[in-house]
Image (cartoon, rainbow, N blue to C red):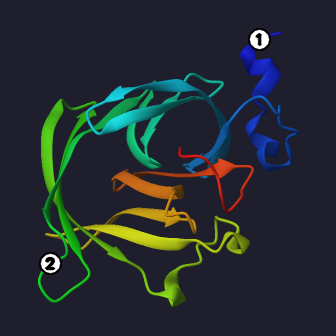
Amino acid sequence: MTLKDEVMPSRSDVRQTALQPNYRYLLVETDGQEALMVWIGNEPHRLGQASVWVSSDGVIIRTVKGKLVGVSEPRRRWQLISEALVASPLPSSSIARLTQSSDAQPGYRMGMVQTVDQKALPASEQAMAWVDRSLGLRWVEEVDSNTGARMALYGLNADNQTIAGQRCVTAQWCLRWQTWPAKASTSSL
């Protein structure tokens, strides 16, 4: 039996899958498809220790403290190279400003730098339909400071750990993820 057969279900019934208790899972959605990914370990990354997640079809996702920092799949590859705090918070607001540098393929877009504003969402906007509301998460969003376009959302539990998120790498390519099974308190992604 392969790793794929043992712990990776087909995409059609992901949320109902009986899970192996000795594995850690990440539920990921992109392009309307859900899949479970399995944690295979940690590796050094410029932003800290990255958790490495693998899908049955070979897609690899890396997270640092629950935030997406890299994804590799057959058609494309993206990684967050660096992130630097510019100001926290900005004068008279609760917004932190970050600069992020990333690389993306195809297209040889290397060292792309964006300025990002990070802020907490009001309680009225905090429940995201794709995450179990009973988790009681607080949500933080990142928007491009030049265009105002939302780039990322992060759901934090009561322990201030990121256990769910959404990141739009491009306007046409967004990923959503959460620890699986869903629970309010968990070890870091």
Q: Position of residue 170 (x, y in %)?
A: 32, 51
Is 62 drawn above or below residue 15 in the view shown?
above
Identified by mark 2, the residue type is Leu
Residue 118 is left or right of residue 37, and the answer is: left
Quadrant position of residue 21: top right
Q: Residue furthest top?
A: 1
Front label number (2 vs 1): 2
Residue bearing the label numbered 1: 2
Is mark 2 in CB contact (under 8 Å) with mark 1? Answer: no
Quadrant position of residue 93: bottom left
Residue bearing the label numbered 2: 90
Q: Using the image, tell me which numbered label, if any, was put on residue 178.
A: none
Q: Distance between the residues labelled 2 and 1?
A: 51 Å
Is 114 drawn above or below residue 91 in the view shown?
above
Secondary structure under tag 1 reads: loop
Residue 91 is left or right of residue 52, and the answer is: left
Q: Where is residue 100 in the image (x, y as percent from the top left)?
A: 19, 50
Identified by mark 1, the residue type is Thr
Residue at 58% x, 72% y is: 128
Is 72 drawn above or below residue 11 in the view shown?
above
Mark 1 Cα-neighbour bin, 10 Å: few <14, some 14–19, many ≥20: few
Q: In which quarter of the image is the N terminus?
A: top right
Q: Position of residue 74 (x, y in %)?
A: 46, 24
Mark 2 Cα-neighbour bin, 10 Å: few <14, some 14–19, many ≥20: few
Question: Between 118 and 27, which is closer to the camera in this rendering?
Answer: 118
Q: Position of residue 65 (x, y in %)?
A: 44, 47
Residue at 81% x, 21% y is: 6
Residue at 19% x, 75% y is: 89
> Reading the chain from its start, which is encountered first: label 2 or label 1?
1
Question: Between 133 and 149, which is closer to the camera in this rendering?
Answer: 133
Secondary structure under tag 2 reads: loop
